[in-house]
Image (cartoon, grey):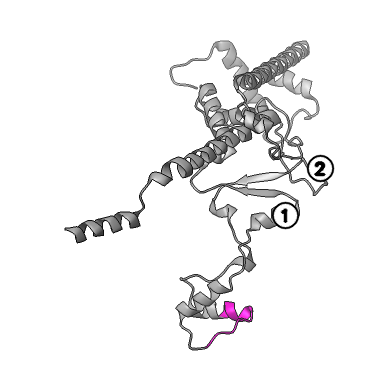
Amino acid sequence: MPKGYEFSQEVKQLMFHIINFVESEKNGPVIPLYNVDDRLVKMLDISERSVRRLKQELHQLRQKEINEQQQQEMKEQGEMDANVRDLRSRTISLPTSKHRESSGSNPPAKILCRRHSASAPSSSSKIDLPIPQALPPQKKSEKERIAICLDNATWHNKLTEESIIPKHSSIKGEIQKWLQDRKINFPEKFVKAQLLQLVCTNCPRKEYMSDRIAKKYAVEIIRLPKLHCSLNPIELLWNNLKQFVRDQNTTFRQDDVKQLIEQFLVAMDDKLASSYFHHVYEVEEMYKTADEIMEEEIEPHLQSDSEETDSDDAEENVD
């Protein structure tokens, strides 16, 4: 019994009946377990009619709770759909430059994936997300291309076994074995530096694991320059995703943040994804224009270090 709280006399009397009934069955059931109504009559010390009425009220109460739960789920689903529509309406697609529209270059890479819903049971906190899967090789027209844009992360640039060569940190025996496996002759008296020079002369062309897998599916790999995140379309996606979560997050709970991320991914469509690539194309054109200005108008007027050194020497000779 909680401290400072007293049960009413009616509640105590009911509890006493239940305690007596339970104690009477410690050596086995007095009334068969399948006879539920008789057991309730004996346990609660009420009439059979009262038991039936209570069971009916309990059924109605359970049905009411189920209906309220369904209404709550429908309300949450409606709010979720409204958030998705709001996201699509507030996300502005970046315009395509006029130069791109008028140029005869190839269209942006087409992102293809097979979509299917997750097999988890549906609930208010679960969303059937499109799960991307690799498509089998298929015949494409000349205007259609599949491309993957990669940055210079280490896991994107893992070399194949055939492309790995010994390094300066390799021991002399490893370098000799590499040369012997490729039937490259070398004098026994060669030191490590000479062996490495021989390796550099006969090193194979670099081939990455990602390129090999992409070639199997006729996919083109586009590698970005180092330290040029502005040329990476996914950076725009991260920016929009973080802004959406920042605007919609009100509870600051991990589960709610995860649900907001799922809502953003559901709202992602081909048009919005293509706009990221169009924006990156405009940035690329801006870099090319800046390079042309640098080469044609600025560099001709710059003085190289060698010219500065020659002029300084000439002044010293005059002095």
Looking at the picture, how far across and down is residue 78, in whole percent? 68, 17
Q: Give amino acid for label 1.
A: Lys
Within-10-Å neighbours for mark 1: few <14, some 14–19, many 20+: few
The span from disc 1 to disc 2 (Cα, nearest Å) is 17 Å
Residue 126 can be seen, yes or no: no
* Secondary structure state at the residue bearing disc 1: helix
Amino acid, disc 2 = Ser
Query: Which residue is disc 1 drawn over?
Result: 215
* Residue located farthest toward the right when viewing the structure as drawn: 139
Give the numbered dot on residue 237. Answer: none
Closer to viewer: mark 1 or mark 2: 2
Quadrant that contains the C terminus:
bottom left
Badge 2: how crowded within 10 Å, few (<14), some, or many (20+)?
Answer: few
Most foreground residue, 39 or 257: 257
Sequence-wise, the earlier of marks 1 and 2 is 2
Residue numbers of the magenta segment: 177-187
Toward which corner of the image does residue 305 lie, by quadrant? bottom left
Q: Is residue 161 magenta?
A: no
Q: Position of residue 5 (x, y in %)?
A: 47, 16
Instruction: Please give the name of the residue rendered at 54% of the width and 11% of the height, measured from the top-left corner.
Output: 8
Q: Residue at x 48, y 21 (%)?
A: 2
Q: Residue at x 53, y 77 (%)?
A: 198
Q: Position of residue 114 (x, y in %)?
A: 77, 39
Residue assigned mark 2:
141
Please, is residue 28 above or below residue 62 in the view? below
Q: Position of residue 314 (x, y in %)?
A: 25, 58
Foreground residue, 27 or 43? 43
Residue 228: tell me if it is visible. Answer: yes
Q: Is residue 179 magenta?
A: yes
Q: How many marks?
A: 2
Q: Is residue 258 left or right of residue 67?
A: left
Q: Camera-side residue: 300 or 1?
A: 300
